[in-house]
Image (cartoon, grey):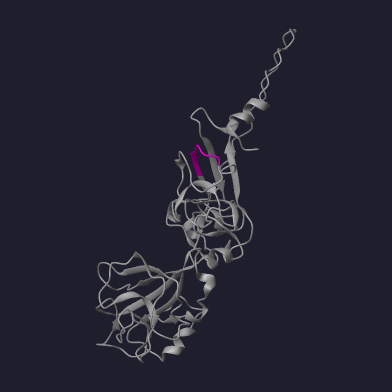
Amino acid sequence: SLSDADKGMDGKFHFKIVWPQRSGQNVQEWKQSSNPVTAVSQGVEGYEAVSAPFTAEFWGGLEKHTGSKSLLDGSVSKPHWWYAIGLVELYNNGIPGPGTIESQVELWVRTPRLTAATTTPAPTPAAQAPEPTAAPTPAPPVPTPATTAMCSSFTCPSGTVARPDADELQGSDSEKCCEIKEWRPLLRQTAPFVQPRDQWLDYDRSHPDADNFGDLASLSDADKGMDGKFHFKIVWPQRSGQNVQEWKQSSNPVTAVSQGVEGYEAVSAPFTAEFWGGLEKHTGSKSLLDGSVSKPHWWYAIGLVELYNNGIPGPGTIESQVELWVRTPRLTAATS
């Protein structure tokens, strides 16, 4: 039914997408002049943000999805189908939303047709004798508002974390107080602790906040995004200044049997020293993984077997702690 009759005086559709079961922000509102339903190719015309907090995954309005996964998508002029509308098949057991997997989606249009069709003139009342004036009914007493707990005292369920502004929010449920985690920890190592590298695959995995933890064995293609790549970050928490290296790659370093990285793509990767190019299987005996691609070194070490200069080889420097994380659609699908 979407047609030019739904456009406003500015010649644009006024849309909003709602993900009702998403914690925190869950509405994307914008205008565009092109009709995504009748379009025959990708692209959006006349895009204008109204209240659009989500910009990840090439957001730019709704377009015709030219693949086979959905009717419409919001990853403009890309082959992905984030912000999917009219999904054909589930992706990681859910619906691709604003870079996360959601369990429900709605698309709305603000239309002048609706008010024109439902607004009718009020009937003119017939003349009648005035009603006798009744004694005013005493107003009921104003109830004293109940004290509402602050979100800072609410314990968020597994798979979610407290919202950054929890100290300022009132509430006592996960929808108001929590947001879904997108990053899943795979490893944390704190010097001087070391162990045989295969033990890092599954080490104290039920305590991901521990100083030493490993869950690398769980990494699989289900953690890849729509672009077919893993989205990783290494963090050196005790390093001064820049301490995060973020990138994508299509190869799984944990299941690899040889050196090398496929599909490397920097996201925010300030460190390039020591032959950095993503994470690979370390084919020596010093660590499980390393980032000195196709070299015998083990800088950017993940799963160190023995200390090097009393610490952990990082981005050309020796660090005292290292973490590896993956940004995964599996996490949001499991907790939505």
Residue 331 visible in the snapshot = yes
Which image quarter holds the N terminus? top right
- In magenta segment, residue 32: yes
Q: Where is 223 relative to 302, above or below?
A: above
Q: In which quarter of the image is residue 6?
A: top right
Residue 169 screen position, x and y as percent = 47, 51
Residue span colored magenta = 29-35
**333 sits left or right of 182 in the view:** right
Who's the residue at 45% across and 72% down the image? 250
- Residue 100 rendering spot, x and y as whole percentages: 52, 59
Query: Could you say where residue 141 lies in the image, as x and y percent from the top left?
Result: 61, 34
Q: Is residue 136 above or below residue 55?
A: above
Q: Quadrant of residue 120?
A: top right
In the rendered image, which quarter contains the C terminus? bottom right
Residue drawn at x 26%, y 87% is: 310
173 relative position to 281: left or right: right
Residue 271 lies in the magenta-colored region: no
Q: Nearer the viewer, residue 205 or 221?
A: 221
